Image (cartoon, rainbow, N blue to C red):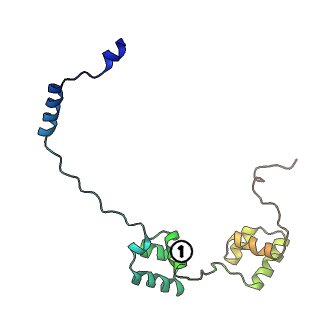
Amino acid sequence: MGLIRTYSNRYNADHLQGVIARVASTSQRPPSEAPPARRFRIDRRLTPEQIAELVTAYKSGTSTPKLCKQYELSKGGVLKVLADNNVLMRQQQHLTESQIDTAVEQYQAGDSLATIAKQMGSAATTVRRVLQERGVAMRPSGRGRRGQTDR
């Protein structure tokens, strides 16, 4: 029981009234000006006219990175606006049938995906995808082979 008595608050009413009086006599700090609230919802950040302009610009060929900058949106935000407006997305990297035929020949001759993609002006993942769609057996990737010596 001795510890409880030692550490318990034993303030009398006069002491507490003095604390209350000191708190009441201090001046109040002026409220700080809060920054303007951020508006997260896209339909609140863009007017219907701006959304219509964005959709029209995309349909006329403007790239999504350019739209992101112009409307100060993330790529996900631009894609959401387009999806909400039932806009079909463009396929970014097309290869013609003759390009695919050439890619198959080059890959089977030993060229790498990166080399073929560079010649086609495309991405290596696109070349890989079209080769797989054609049923071409893919070689193991070259990762991990650097620095290894033949044994």
Q: Nearer the viewer, residue 114 or 95?
A: 95
Relative image position of residue 45 (x, y in whole percent)? 39, 73
- Secondary-structure class at tag 1: helix
Residue at image coords 11%, 38%: 25
Relative image position of residue 130 (x, y in whole percent)? 76, 75
* Tag 1: amino acid: Leu
Q: Nearer the viewer, residue 31 or 144?
A: 31
Q: Is residue 131 above or below residue 30?
A: below
- The image quadrant of residue 90 is bottom right
Q: Is residue 140 above or below residue 71?
A: above
Residue at image coords 56%, 83%: 87
Residue at image coords 49%, 71%: 77
Q: In this figure, what is the number of numbered marks?
A: 1
Relative image position of residue 29 (x, y in whole percent)? 18, 47
Q: Residue furthest right?
A: 151
Q: Is residue 82 above or below residue 6?
A: below
Q: Which residue is mark 1?
A: 79
- The image quadrant of residue 52 is bottom left
Q: Nearer the viewer, residue 109 or 25?
A: 25
Relative image position of residue 22 (x, y in whole percent)? 14, 34
Residue at image coords 80%, 81%: 101
Q: Quadrant of the N terminus?
A: top left
Left or right placement of residue 126 versus residue 26 in this view: right
**Mark 1 surroundings: few (<14), some (14-19) or many (≥20) residues within 10 A:** some
